[in-house]
Each structure stands twice: as C-alpha cells, then as structure tokens.
Image (cartoon, helix red, strand yellow):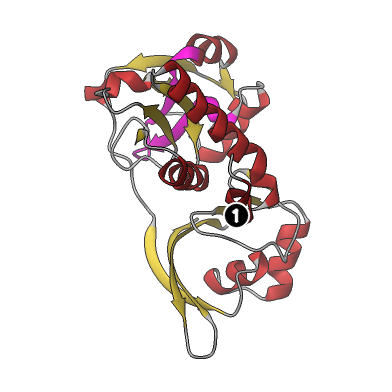
Amino acid sequence: MNANVYQHFRKDEHPFIDSVGDWIEKVESQYAPYLTEFLDPRQAYILETIIRQNSDLSFRFYGGYEQAERKRCLIFPDYYEPTTEDFNINLIEIVYPVKFTSLSHGKILGTFMNTGIKRQYFGDIISDGEHWQIFLAEETMNFVIAQVDKIGKIAVRLEERKYTEIIVPKDEWTSERVTVSSMRLDNLISTVYNISRQRSKQLIESGKVKINWAENLRPDFPLELLDIVSIRGFGRIQIQELEGKTKKEKYRLLLGVLRK
C-alpha cells in the first residue's frame, strides 16, 4: 500500500487500510470478486477513497435495503456483473411478546455484542416502532440464531424473513447544519445537544460516548467526515458533509442527527 495513503487517515485506521490493500490484491491476483463484512460509513468512505486512488477495480455497497447505514462491499474486476444475491445478506426478524414488552436498538445491539458476535457480522437494526429486524451476513447467520434466545430478560426467536417482508423503518434522523469552532468531540456534542462543554466532557470521560461503535474517552478527539457519534441517553450524530469554513475560521457542517 502506497505509504502516503496513511497520512490522510487516523493512526487507528491504519490496520483497516492494510486490510483494504489485501482485499484489492486478492481481487487483482485471483481475478475474482471479494466480499467484505459489514462496514460503517467511515470505513466505507476509506475503502472507496483507497480503491479509487490505487486500482482500476470496481466496487459496490449494499446493506440489505436502500437507506442502509452499514453495508457490505463487493470489490470486483471489470468483467463482473454483481447482483444483490452476491452480498449474502439475510433479513432476520426478532420475534418477541409485543403485547407485554418492548425492545430497543441499544438492548438488541448489547445482546448481540455480549454473545461474542462481532459488529461486522451484522448490519442495520431497524424498527417500525413495534417490529424489529436485523440484517445478517449469511455466513454467520446460523451461529447468530443459535446464540441469541434472550434480549435482556425477554425470550426471543430469530426468524428469517423474505425481502418482501422488510418493514419500513421509522427514520427519525434529521438533517441539521451547524457551525462549530473546532472539530473536537466535546465541542460537537455540546453544540448539537445544547449542553455545556463541561457536561459534554463528563459524558465522554464516563464512557457514554462511542465513535463508530468504539468507546472513546477523549474530549479533544478530532472528528472526521462520516464519523458516527453515539451518546447514551441523547442519540446519535453523523458528520455527513464538511461544508468549508466561515470568515472567522469556524467549521460549517451538515449533520444527520437522531435525538432520543
């Protein structure tokens, strides 16, 4: 991998960049497509940047439905014509006693992670307010179904569904434009949720904040394009576009915001 690729990305992203280099090499040497696990938007952005700069290969993202946030990527030589079947994504419904209890995104995610299922094995978790569905990598589906029979104290069953049975997710993301003095994590959180910088710092240092699904304890952490910040009890922020700077050197951002 070309050494100056690294300088555009964070140090902790270098191992992922190396993986992308390996995948490209595989496709070029075997002249056959390669399918990744589920990637978050930041990883997808890195992968796309690297493929465009370092190879003539084609690629396509798919996460099971149009607006998917987490997607698998198929990297392929120019002769290949991909179809959605190539992405090996299965739609699973979480069957639970709807009348007596309710589930949440956090509870479902926590349960899956606690059974040792890696985050890259499953895609979006979607809900219409009552039903919950999840997109799984076909290769790990049987393992996952065997592992999960409870979410919290609630007995559940995971059942495969046809794509025609996909629910329409309640999309509560809103687009918001903000101007921030810096790209620091604590600064963005306090601006978006209108809380003090001190409160925002406390949330981060007490482990309530994740960036791209990994806990981050640094209030001064510099955010980048397509990062997703989750703040327990508040919601999520995605940096969708960097729209330049104001005369006073402040950053103009287009964000997707999910408020709890």
Q: Residue 260: horizontal and vertical position, in percent?
A: 50, 55
Q: Residue 138: horizontal and vertical position, in percent?
A: 43, 15
Q: Residue 25: horizontal and vertical position, in percent?
A: 51, 27
Asked if the stretch drawn in magenta spans residue 254, the answer is no
> Which corner quadrant holds the N terminus?
top right
Taking the spot 63% from the left edge, 28% from the top edge, the residue there is: 113
Within the image, what quadrant is residue 32 found in?
top left
Taking the spot 67% from the left edge, 67% from the top edge, the residue there is: 186
Label 1 is placed on what type of residue? Answer: Gly
Dot 1 alpha-carbon crowd within 10 angstroms: few under 14, some 14 to 19, many 20 or more = few
Taking the spot 56% from the left edge, 60% from the top edge, the residue there is: 224
For disc 1, the marked residue is: 233
Q: Is residue 133 left or right of residue 9?
A: left
Is residue 150 positioned above or below 214 on the image?
above
- The secondary element bearing badge 1 is classed as loop
Magenta range is 119-139
Q: Is residue 39 left or right of residue 83?
A: right
238 or 56, which lies in front?
56
14 or 150, which lies in front?
14
Q: Residue 116: horizontal and vertical position, in percent?
A: 66, 22
Taking the spot 46% from the left edge, 48% from the top edge, the residue there is: 49
